[in-house]
Image: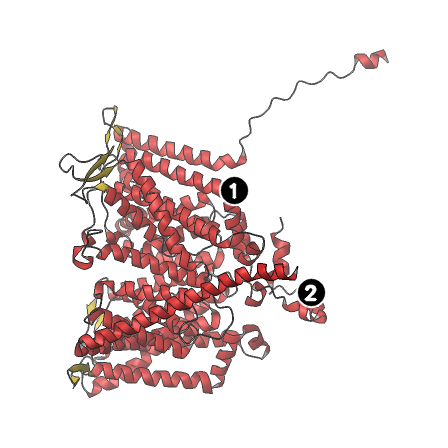
């Protein structure tokens, strides 16, 4: 009797083991393929590859900032905030108008001062919008089945997009940036000053954010709420306030990204939010949703891949850019839903 | 005693049986009645009667809007099967619409001009090259191809939770139209979809033509035969409604509803999860394929730029606002939303502008109105305007915590706590409450 039950129990185990092996095998093959593609690009034409890579990384830095907003919100209330990309777009439009209104349109000393000032203003602006959205739309739906907050997020995305449309107009607008022009030339690779400034600002913001999350009481409360809302409430944490604080932080980062985008790329358009939001969300998923370092890593990686795809010697070209990012999203979801750095909470998918 | 027998009551005549309409036929008969009324209305207008309302009707409800809203209704019905019945949040439904349209573009045009196949098709006289297959056969081909793609798209999502499932389907919903956008000779060395130009013209279908003099002919339906195409679209919509309703009351439909409400319990009850989910995607995709073929015939062409993400979201909104899981609600939602977007807002805006002498660009606010409507509906009336009974129950119930969905029950761990919470009627854990509420 025991032998038959053992034999009967072994077959599904073998099937499961086989499926795991296939899954892990394919995943490993894909990752190796990706690395091989990057190396192939590098070997074929180093300067072009590195140039494309630098361009991609400069985008990746922006993706990282927006991805952090997504990952913060998802980590704490498990909601994919579709409106976050459009919040970033509103940040760009706000920055553009304020820089123009305050007269910071040339790259001089007052321009630098203006950049810092409007950076603060954009962060405050986007943070307050995000907090307002959470208060009006998401708070009531915190315990509802997933469909409701998802659709609400989509609805808010439409609303924000329309606000951007009315504010910016239906055509993209060009602005003269206060970011210093000019570039550094490192062995054939040109790196613009604006890229360097972007990276420095992002690094500073990330350091500040890491300090807030790990060393302050509010950060500890955030991590506690993300882990277990009810237990956090039992510990005396005002969950509503902490969630609003998280939204504010995410919004601030999106605002900063908005200013940097507007100054680096120089155009504002009402529909960049959605695409960039999706790419940023892919980065967050790639790095491990809920994981802050993962979001940054994912952003840089996606930026790099996208840059190589668009400008590298063996890329597919810019018209396949979105498809490449979405294929990465699908592959990550299928093979490694916890992402590269993964969050160590049991059943996420 | 004899008197009592004499006065024994004679049996009263049997009461005449009143004809009662079976309850479940009410809506289909209503649908048929409304369809016939609309047909008669437009027929009379095209014949030249009802001149007092014909101008108003031509501006406010032109037949092209009605036809296109029926196409949207068909797609929304397909999405209803995926989202409304099976509870699988699909944000990339426009991919199936695109595939259906391109099937029509391939099999009903001169795209493959080095071939010359004609199966009861309607090849235009000036270009007999290409593949020209009969409309009904193309419908079946489109449905089959879309079902295959439905399974392909659904396969990676089987293990995923609702948020991630939404994103994977969204990814597919972006990849497939972008593929069609790029698949011309320059980029993939084989001309699959003619790139940004799209495929046009698509063959006309043969149907009853109504001449202004009152005769009824039979021939290819040109761009002015909207009323004849309307008949075809009504028939196709009725077909999809029939498929939806019959599946819904069968085993598959019950399996879908079980998955929607509680996947874990459904699996424990023996519902084959993978097969059922794939069936939902496949059947939903079939509806999209049929709608896509009808769409390319309606607009006599295929263009990749007409398939974008906003269409998927509008379809989802039609399903959700109309009433998730309720076929008639979805049709109403689709027609109303599309009409509003296409004709209602521009015409209403013009009317308001001319009345108040303002110059507001009303059509640009369509997504704002749309978004506000979505948010308000989710906050206050989640189940839609024409709700289905079980959906209302499902969406009002608080979401289960992860521990509960894995089968754990926190209250079991300590009997004193259980007593206390039972006494205070704590409703935050839905497991016991939902068991009471879902029993009829």
**Residue corresponding to mark 2:** B422
Q: Chain of mark 1?
A: B
Q: Is residue B61 left or right of residue A100?
A: right
Q: Position of residue B286 (x, y in %)?
A: 37, 45
Residue A197 to residue B28: above or below: below
Q: Position of residue A333 (x, y in %)?
A: 40, 65
Label 1: which secondary element: loop
Density class for disc 1 (Cα within 10 Å; few <14, some 14-19, many ≥20) is few
Label 2: which secondary element: helix
Determine the residue positioned at 39% across, 68% down: A25
Determine the residue positioned at 36% across, 83% down: A206
Q: Chain of mark 2?
A: B
Residue A66 to residue B317: above or below: below
Q: How many marks?
A: 2
Residue A105 to residue B7: above or below: below
Q: Is residue A28 left or right of residue B114?
A: right
**Residue corresponding to mark 1:** B250
Residue farthest left in this picture = B126
Give whichever of discs 2 and 1 has the lower sequence position: 1
């Amino acid at each position: 009797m025991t032998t038959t039950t053992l034999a009967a129990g072994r077959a599904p185990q073998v099937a499961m083991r086989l499926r795991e092996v296939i899954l892990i095998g394919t995943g490993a093959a894909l990752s190796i393929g990706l690395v091989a593609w990057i190396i192939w690009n590098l070997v074929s034409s180093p300067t072009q590859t590195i140039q494309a890579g630098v361009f991609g990384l400069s985008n990746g830095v922006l993706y990282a900032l927006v991805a952090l907003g997504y990952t913060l919100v998802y980590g704490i209330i498990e909601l994919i905030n579709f409106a976050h990309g459009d919040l970033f777009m509103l940040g760009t439009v706000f920055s553009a108008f304020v820089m123009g209104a305050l007269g910071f349109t040339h790259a001089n000393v007052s321009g630098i001062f203006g950049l810092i000032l409007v950076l603060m203003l954009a962060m405050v602006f986007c943070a307050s919008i995000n907090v307002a959205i959470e208060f009006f739309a998401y708070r009531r739906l915190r315990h509802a089945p997933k469909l409701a907050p998802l659709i609400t997020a989509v609805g808010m995305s439409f609303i924000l997009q329309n606000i951007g449309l009315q504010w910016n107009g239906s055509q993209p607008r060009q602005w003269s940036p206060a970011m210093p022009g000019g570039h550094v030339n490192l062995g054939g690779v040109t790196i613009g000053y604006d890229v360097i400034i972007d990276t420095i600002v992002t690094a500073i913001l990330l350091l500040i954010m890491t300090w807030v999350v790990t060393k302050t009481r509010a950060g500890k409360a955030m991590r506690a709420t993300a882990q277990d809302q009810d237990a956090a409430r039992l510990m005396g944490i005002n969950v509503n306030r902490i969630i609003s604080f998280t939204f504010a932080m995410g919004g601030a980062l999106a605002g900063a990204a908005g200013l940097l985008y507007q100054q680096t790329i120089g155009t504002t358009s009402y529909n960049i939010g959605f695409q960039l939001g999706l790419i940023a969300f892919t980065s967050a998923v790639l790095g491990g949703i809920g994981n802050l370092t993962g979001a940054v890593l994912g952003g840089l990686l996606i930026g790099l891949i996208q840059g190589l795809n668009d400008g590298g010697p063996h890329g597919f070209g810019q018209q396949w850019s979105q498809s490449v990012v979405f294929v990465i999203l699908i592959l990550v979801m299928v093979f490694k839903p916890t992402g590269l750095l993964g969050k160590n909470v049991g059943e996420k998918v | 005693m004899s008197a009592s027998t004499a006065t024994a009551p004679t049996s009263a005549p049997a009461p005449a049986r009143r004809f009662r309409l079976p309850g479940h036929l009410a809506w289909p008969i209503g649908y048929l009645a409304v369809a016939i009324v609309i047909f008669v209305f437009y027929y009379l207008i095209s014949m030249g009667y009802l001149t007092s309302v014909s101008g108003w009707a031509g501006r406010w409800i032109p037949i092209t809007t009605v036809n296109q809203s029926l196409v949207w209704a068909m797609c929304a019905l397909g999405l209803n099967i995926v989202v409304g019945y099976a509870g699988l949040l699909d944000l990339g439904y426009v991919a199936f619409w695109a595939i259906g349209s391109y099937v029509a573009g391939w099999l009903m045009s001169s795209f493959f001009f080095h071939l010359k196949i004609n199966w009861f098709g309607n090849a235009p006289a000036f270009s007999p090259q290409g593949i020209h297959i009969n409309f009904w056969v193309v419908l079946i081909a489109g449905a089959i191809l879309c079902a295959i793609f439905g399974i392909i798209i659904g396969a990676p999502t089987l293990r995923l939770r609702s948020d991630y499932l939404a994103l994977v389907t969204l990814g597919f919903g972006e990849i497939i139209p972008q593929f069609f956008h790029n698949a011309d000779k320059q980029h993939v060395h084989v001309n699959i979809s003619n790139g940004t130009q799209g495929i046009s013209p698509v063959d006309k279908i043969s149907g009853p033509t109504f001449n202004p003099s009152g005769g009824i002919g039979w021939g290819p339906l040109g761009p002015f035969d909207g009323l004849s195409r309307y008949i075809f679209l009504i028939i196709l919509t009725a077909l999809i409604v029939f498929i939806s309703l019959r599946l819904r009351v069968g085993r598959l439909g019950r399996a879908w509803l079980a998955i929607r409400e509680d996947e874990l319990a459904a699996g424990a009850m023996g519902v084959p999860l993978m097969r059922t989910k794939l069936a939902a995607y496949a059947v939903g995709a079939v509806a999209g394929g049929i709608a896509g073929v009808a769409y390319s015939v309606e607009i006599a062409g295929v263009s990749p730029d007409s398939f974008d993400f906003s269409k998927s979201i509008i379809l989802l909104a039609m399903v959700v606002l109309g009433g998730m899981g309720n076929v008639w609600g979805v049709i109403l939602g689709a027609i109303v939303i599309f009409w509003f977007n296409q004709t209602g807002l521009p015409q209403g805006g013009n009317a308001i502008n001319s009345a108040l002498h303002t110059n507001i660009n009303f059509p640009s606010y369509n997504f704002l109105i749309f978004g506000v409507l979505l948010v308000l509906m989710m906050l206050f009336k989640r189940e839609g305007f024409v709700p289905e009974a079980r959906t209302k129950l499902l969406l009002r119930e608080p979401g289960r915590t992860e521990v509960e969905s894995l089968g754990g029950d926190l209250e079991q761990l300590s009997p004193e706590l259980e007593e206390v919470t039972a006494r205070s009627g704590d409703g935050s854990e839905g497991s016991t409450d939902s068991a009471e509420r879902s029993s009829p």
